[in-house]
Image (spheres, helix red, strand yellow):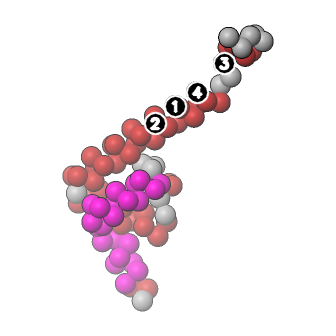
Amino acid sequence: MGAQMVDRKQTPLKLTEFGVILDAYGGDPRRWPTDRRAAMLATLANNGGAWVCLREARALDMLLNQLAALQTVPSQRYKNGSRR
């Protein structure tokens, strides 16, 4: 059983499964499930399409981070006491 798990971790994923994990966890490998990370990296090593998916996921991560930063910065209007 242990050998199967090692093989599974190092076997590249189908691109659809790779995309599902990216959709759920984003483009940062540190956020990928530890039991799937090696398989994700193996997929990147063996599939050019995976790199396209990863770039798109990272671009989305960056946009979401920028949006979150904008939402946490109070509007200058509210700082001055004006609501208009």
- Farthest right residue? 81
Q: Answer whether labels 2 and 1 touch (C-beta < 8 Å).
A: yes
Q: Which comes before the other along the chain, label 4 or label 2?
A: 2
Distance Cα–Cα, label 2 vs label 3: 21 Å
Residue 81 placement, left or right of 51 = right
Q: Quadrant of residue 70?
A: top right
Q: Looking at this view, name the residue that lies furthest to the front.
A: 84
Q: Earlier in the sequence, mark 2 or mark 3?
A: 2
Residue 20 shown in magenta: yes
Please tell me which residue is depicted at 65% across the width and 30% down the height of the picture: 72
x then y, percent, for residue 35:
46, 70
The image position of residue 36, as x and y in percent, is 42, 67
Disc 4 residue crowd, few under 14, some 14–19, many 20+, Cα 10 Å: few
Residue 63 located within the stretch drawn in magenta: no
Mark 4 lies on residue: 70
- Secondary structure beneath disc 2? helix
Vertical placement of residue 51 versus 9, above or below: above
Do the residues bearing badges 3 and 1 touch, measured as CB atoms within 8 Å? no
Image: 68 above or below 38: above
Question: Which amino acid does the dot numbered 1 rest on?
Answer: Gln
Name the residue located 49 percent from the left edge and 65 percent from the top edge: 34
> Gap between marks 4 and 2, in whole Å?
12 Å
Looking at the rendered structure, the kind of residue marked 2 is Met
Q: Identify the magenta region.
A: 4-25
State the residue position of label 3: 75
Q: Which residue is mark 2?
A: 62
The residue depicted at 38 percent of the width and 59 percent of the height is 20
Q: Are marks 1 and 4 in contact (CB under 8 Å)?
A: yes
The C terminus lies in which quarter of the figure? top right
